[in-house]
Amino acid sequence: MSAMITIALSKGRIFEETLPLLAAAGIVPDENPESSRKLIIATSRPDVRVVVVRAADVPTYVQYGAADLGIAGKDVLLEHGGAGLYQPLDLKIARCRLCVATPAGFDYAAAVRRGARLSVATKYIATAREHFAAKGVHVDLIKLYGSMELAPLAGLADAIVDLVSSGGTLKANQLVEAEEIMPISARLIVNQASLKMKRACLQPVIDAVREAVR
Ligand code: ATP
Ligand code: MG
């Protein structure tokens, strides 16, 4: 009898873009979490199930071993810190970039040169703190959970740190990308203890996904 493998996934773009990679490992979820309300979804493989969690919660499920595998954006992994996680694969999906954005009329470069103190709204507090500290920019960070683009418009902050893909949302809100912090893509993450104890089950899945990414 083989051990049960639990995979933590979030709904939406990660789930959609992950389906072909899982299919390469012979794993096809029985239901789509977009239409189903189930949080535990069986798959075509009796020894594999999917748990559906918020994107930011994926590393936590895998860290504590409630899931053996997960797929999470690098943005989420940086904020989490990666404790207890093995990160064997860049899946090259859900690609975007983490950026500093400001209102079109705000001279970010000049404010940085002047040594101005900037207020920055973001859901990526840890990553933003590290970025600005490395540049020697003084910032007051304001934690938000979504709709970061609103913050400068409403007068909450001078700038935001957020994910950008096409730039359409920034443009629609008269914001411009002032600086790229880093490119982002989704990663396969593995619980370190699971990898040791269930290696015979997990390694073939990891290998099949690696082949599918290539
Ligand atoms: P929730 O909707 O539960 O608040 P979320 O907004 O983080 O969570 P998604 O929008 O599905 O959930 O984002 C999941 C991951 O997809 C992010 O962590 C990021 O890595 C990536 N991502 C987010 N926005 C984009 C984008 N515009 N283009 C490509 N990838 C993105
Ligand atoms: Mg989102």
Image: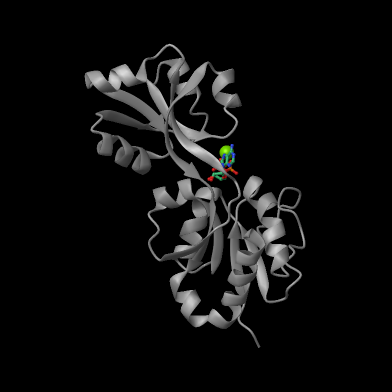
Q: Position of residue 137 (x, y in %)?
A: 26, 29
Quarter assignment of residue 102: top left
Q: Say above or below: 166 vs 19.
A: above
Q: Position of residue 143 (x, y in %)?
A: 39, 34
The residue shown at (54%, 69%) is: 68
The residue shown at (50%, 24%) is: 149
Outermost residue to the bottom: 1
> In this orientation, does residue 41 appear?
no
Quadrant housing the N terminus = bottom right
Quarter assignment of residue 192: bottom left
Front residue of 132 and 153: 132
The residue shown at (42%, 28%) is: 160
Quadrant housing the C terminus = bottom right
Ligand 2, by image quadrant, is top right
Front residue of 156 and 91: 91
The residue shown at (22%, 22%) is: 115
Indicate the colouring scheme: one colour
